[in-house]
Image (spheres, rainbow, N blue to C red):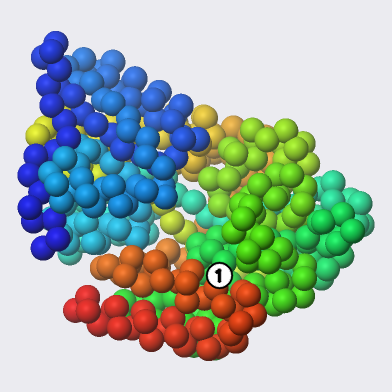
Amino acid sequence: MLFATACSGGGGASGSGKVELSYRIWDKNQMPAMQQIVDKFETSHPGINVTIQLTPSAEFWTKMQANVTGGDAPDVFWINGAHAQFYAANGALLPLSDSVKQGRIDPANYPKSLVDLYSYQGTQYGVPKDFDTVGLWYNKKLFDAAGVKYPDDTWTWDTVKDAARKLTDASKGVHGIAAVAAGQENYYDTIFQAGGYVISPDGKSSGYDQPAAIAGLRFWTDLVKDGVSPSLQSMTDTAPSQMFESGKVAMYYGGSWNAIEFARNDYTKANADVAVLPAGMKRAVTLHGLANVVAAKTQHPEEATQFVEFLGSKEAADIQAGTGAVIPAFNGSQDAWVKSMPQFHLQAYLDELPYAMTYPTSKNTDAWQQQEPKVLAPAWTGDKDVATVAREMADLMNAALRKEG
């Protein structure tokens, strides 16, 4: 197995005799909340010190793989759905069975889809930390200037297309929407809304070559083709969220994690708001979320498990909610997050939960998901037809899934 050579974890003991734990995360926007949680934990567990390691998402998993293989992984770290099965199957995560059996971790406290996402072959490996959905952010100032009504739950794909045309002003360098070539925030949602799937329910085949998936992809490529979205190259050179923050894009499909960023930006704080995603053939949105896990080879399994149990508590969830960092996974704590940024209609993200679809994953998600940007890009640039790249993606994905066994 890939991680079979891993030995001791990244913790140790300090000169004061306290146990030292390392905790790796990737989002700087969440650092204040995570530090508050660590401080609370250390107060109630005076024999343990926790040091947060902030590693940018772009290099997080490359570094994690090297650390786990080399035996110097952090004691506790964030994990997402794309990597959960892979790390669990390769023996890199400590089972949390005892914590569940003894009631210190109660799966009923979290959305079932997230609990399932972080279990493998009947064993729980992760404690849900937060969850996210995707909403339609819009620039009220640009909408008012163009005489376009604000988005609401009556909007459909056609409404988006029509509004994008009206909001585009080439003379001012303003585009109606950012048609980003991104999975969770964009084409996974529209594939689901078209009635399709990315991976079959049994996890054995791709849905990319199905008509619904092709329609979900074409929704975005048509926006670029029609000139109401910046080009793929433009969105590569400048982050689409930054375009939205500077008033150069009127609509942006953004995750709930974008809210705190937009609240800190003077322009979007004053001019932006968010609504539920428009409907396609049906209403749908991608649901994802993170979990906290313990490295299998940590030197301090008892203390690291205690920390993860605390990270999954309502107390920790309330801290996350109060800072607005993310939507906490602990049931009943989400309302505080909604109220943390009253200038935005954050309730929209929770209103989508009844029709949310779980983020697509497999045993080795990276094997096919990392190829999506490269394979699908020619459809965004217009160099290949959408149906062609969709079939290419399906072929590649099916080959990867067959290797999973």
Please tell me which residue is depicted at 35% across the width and 58% down the height of the picture.
81
Quarter holding the N terminus is bottom left
127 lies above or below 385: above
Residue 172: % across, % down? 87, 54
Quarter holding the C terminus is bottom left
Q: Is residue 101 left or right of residue 307?
A: left
Q: Is residue 28 left or right of residue 7?
A: right
The furthest residue to the top: 16
Residue 142: % across, % down? 84, 51
22 lies above or below 141: above
Please tell me which residue is depicted at 15% across the width and 51% down the height of the picture.
69
Query: For residue 278, which quarter of the picture?
Result: bottom right
- Can residue 97 be spotted in the picture? no
Residue 8: % across, % down? 9, 39
Quick one: label 1, few (<14), some, or many (20+) residues within 10 Å?
Answer: many
Residue 280: % across, % down? 64, 75
Q: How many marks?
A: 1
Q: Is residue 289 left or right of residue 378?
A: left
Please tell me which residue is depicted at 57% across the width and 66% down the height of the picture.
181
Please tell me which residue is depicted at 33% across the width and 83% down the height of the picture.
398
- Can residue 23 be spotted in the picture? yes
Query: Amino acid under label 1?
Result: Tyr
Tell which of 326 and 382 is nearer to you. 382
Q: Is residue 285 left or right of residue 34?
A: right
Q: Which residue corresponds to mark 1? A: 187
The local secondary structure at tag 1 comes to helix
254 lies above or below 302: below
